[in-house]
Image (cartoon, rainbow, N blue to C red):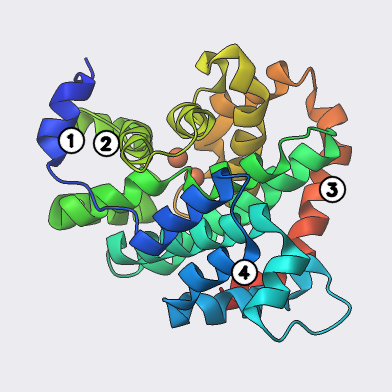
Amino acid sequence: MPITPQELIANLGDLPPLPQVAAQVLRLSADPDSTTDELQRVISTDQALAAQILKIANSAMFGMVREVKTLTQAIMTLGFSTIKSIVIASSARNLYKRGGTGLQERLLWEHALVTAIAARAYARSFRSPRVEEAFLSGLMHDIGKAVMGLKFPERYGAMMRSIYNDDADGMDSELDLFGFDHTMVGEAILHQWNMARSLENTVRWHHDPGHAPAEDQALTAFVALGNQLALDHNVGIGKPESLAIATQQALDILNLTAETLAGHRLVAVEALEADKNLIKDF
Ligand SMILES: [Fe+2]
Ligand SMILES: [Fe+2]
C-alpha cells in the first residue's frame, strides 16, 4: 500500500528549491505586463544560463536563419514562452545531473530531453495546442528519480544499477524499497516549485495515463508515448516493454491502434533526428 502524500514529504525532508533565476523568469513570463528588458536583466544575472540560451537559440532546434548574438535578440526571436522552457530545462538539467548516481546521470538527462522532444512532436502531430506543455512535461517526467537519487544516494543508486543490469521493473522496485515511486516524488517537487497543475498531473500519471484527470489525459498520453520512444531508442534506464501498460492506455486515450500510431511516431522520430545536436550539447 503506497504511503500518503504527508508521509512522503516527511520521508523526503527538504526538497531542492527551484533556482532563483528560474523562479523569477516564471513569474515574469506569467505577467502580461513584463517586458523584454526585465527578462533580459534577470537572465543576465546568471551568465552560464545566458550563454546556454544563446547557444540554444542558435541551435537547429529553432531553425534560425540569422545568427542570434545578444540575449535581447534571443528573447525577441524566441518569445517569452520558449525562453521560459529553456530556463526550466536548464534547471531540470542541473537537478537531473546532481541526482544521478555515477553512470546514470547522463542517461537520466538525455532520457528526459529525448522524451520532451518526442512528446512535443506527438502533440504537434495531433494538432494539440499544448506543445509547450508537452515539452516541459517530458522534461520533468522523471524528475522524481533525480530527487530520489539525491535523497537516497546509496539505496537508490544500487536500485538503478540493478534495473540497468537485470531489467528489473523500476516502479515495482521503488514501491518495494521506499513505499513510493518517482511519479509521486515528481508531483511533490513540481508542487513545491509552483509549476502548473497540468505539469504535476502529467508527471504523476505518466506510467498510468488512464488515471490522469480528463483534461490532461491527452497531454499525459503524449508524454507516455515520448517516454516509450526514448526507451525504444535505448535512451534511458529500463526496457520499453516495462511501459506496455502505459503505452496501451495512451493509445486508448488518443483513439489509436499500434498501426495508426505509426505515422505520428514517424513525426516524433524525425524530430529527434532534427534535434540530435541539441541533445548532444545541452
Ligand atoms: Fe517514469
Ligand atoms: Fe522515463
Res. 235 visible in picture: no
Measured as percent of width and height from the top left, residue 94 is found at 38, 66
Measured as percent of width and height from the top left, residue 233 is found at 64, 56
Nearest-to-viewer mark from 2 and 4: 4
Nearest-to-viewer mark from 4 and 1: 4
Q: Residue at coordinates 40% horizontally, 53% vertically from top-left? A: 23
200 lies above or below 109: above
- The amino acid on which the numbered mark 2 sits, given as a three-letter code, is Glu
In space, the residues marked 2 and 4 are separated at their CA atoms by 28 Å
Residue where numbered disc 4 is placed:
279
Residue where numbered disc 1 is placed:
177
Q: Quadrant of residue 273?
A: bottom right
Q: Residue at coordinates 55% horizontally, 41% vertically from top-left? A: 137
Q: Are marks 1 and 3 in contact (CB under 8 Å)?
A: no
Q: Sequence order check: which comes first, mark 4 or mark 1?
A: 1
Q: Sequence order check: which comes first, mark 3 or mark 4?
A: 3
Residue where numbered disc 3 is placed:
266
How many other residues sit within 10 Å of disc 3, few (<14), some (14-19) or many (≥20)?
A: some
Residue where numbered disc 2 is placed:
174
Q: Quadrant of residue 281?
A: bottom right
- The amino acid on which the numbered mark 1 sits, given as a three-letter code, is Leu
